[in-house]
Structure formats: structure tokens, C-alpha cells
Image: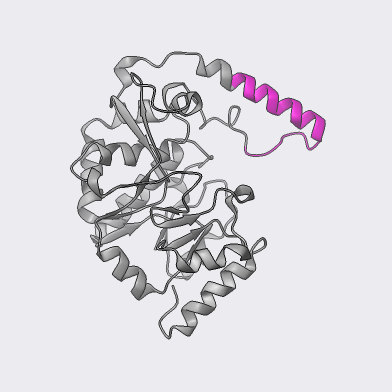
Amino acid sequence: MYIHVDDQSSLDRERLTGLGAIVIPLAESYRTRWGSYALVRATLKLLACATREKYDRYVLISGGDLPLHCKSVLKERLAAREIVMSCWHELSASKISASRQLRNDVFKRHYLDFSLLNPRTDPFGHWWLDKCWRQVVKGMNTLVAGIPIPARLETHGTYYRGPQFWALSHDVVQFLFGEIGRNPEKYHQRFRLMYAPDEVIFQTLLMHSSYREQIKWVQRKNDTCHGIQFINYHRSGAYLCRDDIPELSASSALFARKVDPKKNPDVISHFFDKIDSSGLPKV
């Protein structure tokens, strides 16, 4: 297991290493603000470290994911496909095939790596001042989005968006490195200007390749199986609860997202008990 920890996190890296994980060193870690290009960099860093061992499959998950099966079942399911990935939207600059907001996410400027435009916490600790500050930040982001993106930065005529988390074979990961490696600076310049580029760059590269037929189209709000994950976007913050257990149990998804030990311990204990009762090793 390879883990990237936000460079500002207080999470104990030594404890993770003691549990058998390979943790990206602090000096090589990124400040992974939500929706920022740093998430792409962190993902590529993890893949670069993991591919040295030439594993059969690379599965990207986060700390908010829960395995729904034991190791042997996960391995069997993953071995059957080179790619387990989903797409939500096709976005083109020349064709109106999505909502204005979705198009703005890709074709308008965003600088979400900067704390001023993407603050992670309210700075004042007073509801009225923090509310006013959020409006100021929103206004600054609106102004920035009005600056045109130069056509020379476009990497593709059409971009594809989907869930960040997926499972890929070694050959597919090598293909991604090859594509980005041809012009890494151009990919950096273009995708860092997007909103949530981690949901766009990998889907876009693979949808413009011979692997495209292996990617499943899903509806973001209506479907619950998104690539490797079960996600219920109708839940507050997408956090799962006990009422989701029957559908989770019947789902073809490999992991559940999102779970939190404080918010939904029932969901976590149910599936850990299920894995134990199978007589097979825990994940």
C-alpha cells in the first residue's frame, strides 16, 4: 500500500509506515486542496512509486473508502478487467453538450492550488465575518474565470469527466505516463486551470485511446456504482448510512465511499464483520 499524506496534515507518518504502508516522504508531498491540480500531482507521485514494483493492478482510493470484500474477492474482480473506471460527462469547447457550469469547470480559469482562492477553513471564527469572506472569495474566483484560456494550451478538443478513483493495469498506467511524458509542461499548464482536474485528466487521456471501450458511462446523480466505488450523492456530503447497507451488499462496487468512523460506524462494522465471517483474511 502506498499512501500520500497532505503536507500540512498532522497524521502520524511513522505509524502508517509501521503498519506496512509505503508513505511518500514529507519533502515530496503536496498540499492537496480539494479540486486542485495538486491532487493530480499526488496521484502521479503514488503511481510512479508503485510502478517500480510492476504490480498487475493499481487501485486509487482515499481514507474515506471502505472495502466491501476480502482480499481474494477484490483480486478476482480486478483481474477480470484492465480498467475499472467511469465517465460522467463529455465536454467540448465547440459543442454544447453539458450545462454551463460543467463547461465553466473545464474551459474557465480556476486557481484552486492557491489558499486565497481555495481556503480550507474559515479564517475568522465568526459566522458573519466568515460568511462575508466566502462571498469575497467567490467574487475573486468569478473575476479570475473571466480571463480567457489561450487556445494554445488546449490538449484535446473534447474532455471527459468522471470519478477520481479507479483501478488500472500496469500497461494502462505506463500508457498514461507515456502520454503525459510527451509534453508534461503543457498538461500541467492546461489542467491546473481546471476545476477538479483529477476528475478529468485520466478519463480524457484514456477516452482518446484504444482503451475507451472499457470505460463505463454512468449518471452522476442517479447511479450508485461509479467505477470501483459505491457512492450515493443523494446523501448529505455523500456520507453513507445504515440505510445504504442493503444496496451496498447487492452492489458490484468494490469499495464504498464515503464512510467516517464517527458518522457511520454501523456501515464499517457491518462489512468488517462480513469479511471476518467469510473465513478469509481481512483487507
Residue closer to the observer: 220 or 20: 220
Q: On screen, 80 above or below 217?
A: below
**Residue 130 counted in the magenta span:** yes
**Position of residue 123 measured from the top left corner of the image (x, y, whole percent):** 72, 34
Tell me the quarter of the image containing the C terminus: bottom left
**Position of residue 251 measured from the top left corner of the image (x, y, whole percent):** 44, 63
Residue closer to the observer: 259 or 253: 253
On the picture, is 281 further left or further right than 261? left
**Position of residue 35 measured from the top left corner of the image (x, y, whole percent):** 50, 37
Q: Residue at x 42, y 22 (%)?
A: 107
Q: Residue at x 57, y 69 (%)?
A: 268
Tell me the quarter of the image containing the N terminus: bottom left
Q: On screen, 234 above or below 103?
A: below
Residue closer to the observer: 227 or 186: 227
Q: Residue furthest front?
A: 222
Q: Main secondary structure of the magenta part?
A: helix
Q: Residue at x 50, y 78 (%)?
A: 274
**Residue 10 counted in the magenta span:** no
Residue closer to the observer: 31 or 64: 64
- The range drawn in magenta is 120-140
Q: Residue at x 40, y 17 (%)?
A: 149
Query: Which color scheme did the rendering employ for the protein?
Result: one colour
**Position of residue 177 measured from the top left corner of the image (x, y, whole percent):** 25, 43
